[in-house]
Amino acid sequence: MQLQQLLFSQGFGSRHECAGLIVQGRLRIAGATPTDPYEEVDPEGLEFELDGQPWPYREKALVMLHKPPHYECSMKPKHHPSVLSLLPGPLRVRGVQPVGRLDEDTTGLLLLTDDGALIHRWTHPKKKLPKVYEARLKHPMDEAARQRLLAGVVLDDDPAPVAATAAELPEPTLLRLTLTSGRYHQVKRMVAAVGNRVEALHRPQFGRLALPPDLTPGAWRWVDATAV
Ligand code: URA
């Protein structure tokens, strides 16, 4: 792959702009500063630096973000900034999008990718990818309500009941719920259906991937798709 194509594919601007970056000596690969935009490199596993910032080559981008509150997952946010504003420009240029959505006030693990097939696969109901949520509740939850969440509750937009795969109560007002479906406001509506209310919601896990304890709110990290 030509160096200018390498930078272009990673979201650093038009081919012309990327050629300019290389000619200006802003690209470094393995300690060298190549200045020919047409020089060929093997991109597989390549790490490069642009303006001193390290960057791995990824054919498709997949990152996790520790979503803070007051950010919207929508591409056209209405009341708060988009989660995309927390990512560096090249990832936005590549067109990464959230894999599913978290509400504006929900925190936790959000995956973003420019791989449309991956988004389709991981959000498809048939895939049944488990997502773990921790809900702080307004009222203590009793065993009967926990059992109802496991048996299935009816939400207002569909007569077919939705059930949690797991529901634990580490504390009477802390519900740890595992869902394999992803309906609109699903946790909040399931909790409301058993007469309680979610006061704060956090997602510590998506598939097999757990939010790393050292990934602070607003920070992001590259992810290998096989880890999900
Ligand atoms: N369920 C909700 O109610 N909100 C979220 O953000 C995610 C799941």
Image: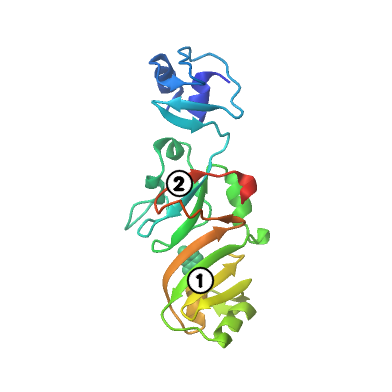
- Rendered view: 31 above or below 117: above
Judge by depth and name the residue closer to the eye, 89 or 176: 176
- Provide residue 214's location: percent of width, then percent of height: 46, 51
Q: Nearer the viewer, mark 2 or mark 1?
A: 2
Does residue 49 appear to the left or right of 70 in the view shown?
Answer: right
Q: Residue furthest top?
A: 36
Query: Which secondary structure, mark 1?
Result: helix
Q: Would residue 183 be visible to someone looking at this image?
A: no
Give the quadrant of the N terminus.
top right
Q: Residue at x 54, y 31 (%)?
A: 57
Indicate whether 158 appears above or below 194: above
Q: Is residue 34 visible?
A: yes
Q: Which residue is mark 1?
A: 187
Left or right: 74, with 205 as reference point: left
Q: What colour scheme does the image use?
A: rainbow
Q: Residue at x 38, y 51 (%)?
A: 82
- In the structure shown, which secondary structural element does the residue marked by tag 2 occupy? strand
Q: Residue 134 — which label?
A: none
Return the residue found at the far left.
79
Q: Label 2 belongs to which residue?
A: 220
Q: Is mark 1 within 8 Å of ligand 1?
A: yes
How many marks are shown on the rendered structure?
2
What distance separates the C-alpha of mark 2 from that of mark 1?
24 Å
